Image (tube, rainbow, N blue to C red):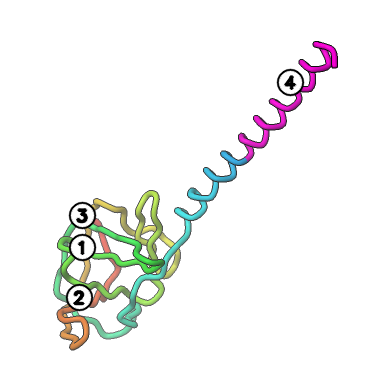
Amino acid sequence: MNLSHRALTTAALIVVLFGTTLTSVSVASAQPRHALSREYLLPSDGWSPGKPALTALCEGVFHATLTNGHARAWLGSDKTIFLWPTGYRVRFGPTELIDAKGRVVGHGGQHIDTGGGFESSQSQGQVWLVMSDPTEG
């Protein structure tokens, strides 16, 4: 094999390997963005607008986490379990609270107000039932 043939073979191999690496990197980096844009249904109290509601005020900074494919969202301290109106979801990257109509109604780190009230549960302790549309606090 002469030098020019060897150089061409090496160059072709580099192009193939480099192209494969770039394809792998672009596919791998695209997957997390897709996963982050997924919406996760929040635990619900079954309440929806138009139903009777508790009207105590709860306010605090909005937070959400995803553990084993299950989303959880709350205001203020993470010690209180929040049950959201039917159809509420959360999306991550950035963290967004989405109402039943698909509108973004809150962002992670944003101060939010909601109406609702506490309910005692034997299995979960004190639970906050969200019974209003969240608003900026």
Task: For marks 3 and 4, give the one nearer the viewer.
Answer: 4
Give the residue pinned by disc 3: 111
SS category of the residue bearing label 4: helix
**109 with respect to 88 (left or right):** left
The amino acid type of the residue labelled 3 equals His
Q: Check disc 1 and report its element: helix, strand or loop.
A: strand
How many angstroms separate mark 3 from mark 4 (CA)? 57 Å
Q: Is residue 42 left or right of residue 127?
A: right
Q: Position of residue 89 (x, y in %)?
A: 39, 66
* Residue drawn at point x = 45 percent, y = 62 percent: 39
Residue placed most toward the observer, 75 or 106: 75
Which label belongs to residue 128? 2
Q: Are marks 2 and 3 in contact (CB under 8 Å)?
A: no
Give 41 or 133, whichever is nearer the viewer: 41
Residue position for label 1 = 75
Q: How far apart are the alpha carbons under marks 1 and 2? A: 10 Å
**Earlier sequence position, callout 3 versus callout 4:** 4
Taking the spot 41% from the left edge, 60% from the top edge, the residue there is 103
Viewer-nearest of discs 1 and 4: 4
Which label sits in the foreground, 1 or 3?
1
Task: Please tell me which of labels 1 and 4 falls first in the chain.
Answer: 4
Which of marks 3 and 1 precedes in the sequence? 1
Residue drawn at the location 59% of the way across and 44% of the way down: 27
The amino acid type found where label 2 is placed reads Trp
Q: Amino acid at mark 4?
A: Ala
- Kindly check if marks 3 and 4 are in contact, taking CB atoms under 8 A apart as contact: no
Label 1–label 2 contact, CB within 8 A: yes
